Amino acid sequence: MHKILKIVALVLSLAGIGALINIIIKGDETIKGLALDGDTSTVEPMAWIAYIILGLVLLFVVIFVFKNLFTSGKSLKNTLIGVGAFLAILLIAYLVSGGDTNQYKYNGLVASDGESKMVGAGLVAFYVLGAVAVATMLFSGIKKLIK
């Protein structure tokens, strides 16, 4: 598996270098002129290589996270507690937030009461999670100072 990953990394690296050389050879002005005409064939290979690399990284992250979760019962328990706490904060934020009496417009449309409530819930959840993050950082800093 390790050997295959090295070969894939080498191939993607060489393809990226080739795409970069092609971009450098054509120059900025030529690429801008082609892009104005709708021709993006010069930069598309570089974008596709980046998409492939991003996809592979995300795939491996997900695979290894789930592998680690299911091999250790303690980590699975801690993860489920964290996800449950996050969902509880979202639910409480939704229940606490009320609809707004003002009418808001976006893209020429009036926001509904449900959309207004969802935005309010998002803001409340953001504030709660931000406060928890600040409190955690303060607690950690104070704990290090005491030791």
Image: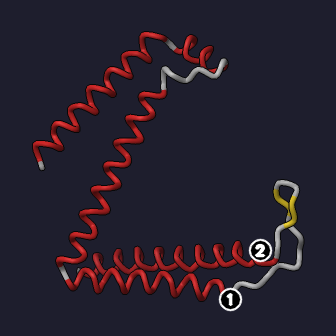
| Residue 45 image point, x, y percent | 42, 28
Q: What is the number of callouts on the image?
A: 2
The type of residue carrying mark 1 is Val
Towards the viewer: 49 or 129: 49
Residue depicted at x 21% and y 85%: 73
Q: Earlier in the sequence, mark 2 or mark 1?
A: 1
| Residue 12 image point, x, y percent | 28, 33
- Mark 1: which secondary structure? helix
Quadrant of res 77: bottom left
- Mark 2: which secondary structure? helix
| Pointer 2 local density, CA inside 10 Å: few below 14, some 14–19, many at least 20 | some
Residue depicted at x 27% and y 81%: 76
| Residue 65 image point, x, y percent | 27, 67
Q: Quadrant of the C terminus?
A: bottom left
- Checking the image for residue 96, the label placed there is 1
| Residue 16 position (above or below residue 114) | above
- Checking the image for residue 116, the label placed there is 2
Residue depicted at x 65% and y 84%: 94
| Residue 15 position (above or below residue 146) | above
Task: Determine whether, in the image, residue 72 is placed left or right of residue 25.
Answer: left
Residue depicted at x 45% and y 86%: 85
Contact, mark 2 vs mark 1 (Cβ under 8 Å): no
The type of residue carrying mark 2 is Ser
- Checking the image for residue 9, the label placed there is none
Quadrant of res 36: top right
Mark closer to the observer (2, 1): 2
| Pointer 1 local density, CA inside 10 Å: few below 14, some 14–19, many at least 20 | some
